[in-house]
Image (cartoon, rainbow, N blue to C red):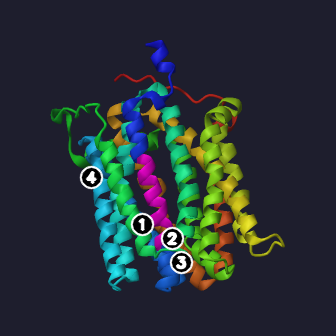
Amino acid sequence: MTSEKRRSLAHHPDFRRLWTGDALGQLGAQLTGFAIPVFAVQTLHATEWEMGLLGAAEFAAFLVLGLPSGAWVDRMRKRRVLITADLARAGVLAVVVAAALAGAASIPLLVAAAAVIGGCTLFFDVAHQSYVPGLVGLDRIVEGNSKLQATGSVAQAAGPALGGVALRVITAPALMAVTVVTYLLSAFWVGRIRQREELPDPATRRGLWTEVGEGLGFVVREPLLRRMVACTSLSNLAGNIGFAVFTIYVLRTLGLPEVELGIIVSAGAIGGILGAVLAERITRVVGEGRIIPLTALLFAPAYAAIPLAATLTAPPAVVLVAGMAVSTFIIVVYNVAQVSFRQRLCPPALLGRMNASVRFIVWGVIPVGSLLGGWFGTALGVVPTLWIAVVGSALAALPVLLSPLIRMRELPTPKLSS
């Protein structure tokens, strides 16, 4: 048993299947996330407000369905939720591809598709984070999360670069069609997981909103978790004010071509790969408590490289690559630390509802940030909007900076009764 536990999760057959499915899904998501905004800006001539609306639609489900989704997921087999979400996303994207090829694509269609895909992503993410602890065990979740974060970062690095190069040869609809295939392959690999998942006893269920309240109450009552969630939420709000106008900023304000946009996003994501690889080691050196406020504090200076690219004498692409690499590195180290803590802190039966409550709070603000970014971009201009995002990111660190976390080397380990 001891030697088995020391083996890498790469030798765990079911985790390897989840890992493969996740890699394919992440690659597909990155290709889509690159192709749709470029298609909207370059082909459909989207305005700042329309881009903000498109970004808001992608995350609207986290605000509308974020809380009950956790209670629903806790009543389902999470593997089945993952498969269904992949198949649904493939189907919606296939409709968008068909419309684009027929010349019937429009901003309203893209907004509607983004909203549906976002709903599928909501259920996928809640089920995904709740599935990992039961699949690998509580003592392996940091390793599991690090590997999955590394996969996401590799997808972020490879996807946009591949997309930028591909758009020189094929159309955006053809690139989205590739994503349909990746989602289907993701569903196939997740479907091969053999571990049987036991459903909770239906007799233990209570009313939906009673169970929702338990998940939200757990997040609100835990002091350290509450501060982490506040920091993440404010950071997401600020960051998405800027990201709402990012594609317009690169393609129109800086005048860079699509291929350079892809290279910028991909090269920046290399920082995320390093963050995922080094997260465990850095956390051991700095301390799993202190690493959270430290990374939160460093994010705003790194993010400032985006608006600075319009004024510095250095080539804009170089400045953007450097800033995004450091930003992504910081985000991934922060995420590994705080996600692992909340998975370890929460009782297993409450994981879905806890994760959904956290997603509701930290991702529910994203559509608000996107709409604000679209409004600021229209009223003030693209570059001032990016500086507003930088200031907001700096303020977002305060909940964890002004907390006991800054003095803690180790985070508390809960005593779970079940």
Residue 40 visible in image: yes
On screen, residue 204 versus residue 86, left or right, reads left
Q: Earlier in the sequence, mark 2 or mark 4?
A: 4
Residue at 63% from the left image edge and 64% from the top image edge: 263
Residue 350 x %, y % = 34, 37
Which amino acid, by three-letter code, is at mark 1?
Glu
Marks 4 and 1, Cα distance to the nearest angstrom?
Answer: 18 Å
Query: Is 29 a magenta residue?
Result: yes
Residue at 67% from the left image edge and 59% from the top image edge: 324
What number is the disc on residue 374?
Answer: 3
Q: In this figure, which residue is indicated by the disc labeled 2?
A: 370
- Residue range (magenta): 22-36
Are there few (<14), some (14-19), or many (20+) residues within 10 Å of tag 3? many
Query: Is 203 a magenta residue?
Result: no
Image quadrant containing the C terminus: top left
Q: In this figure, which residue is indicated by the disc labeled 1?
A: 58
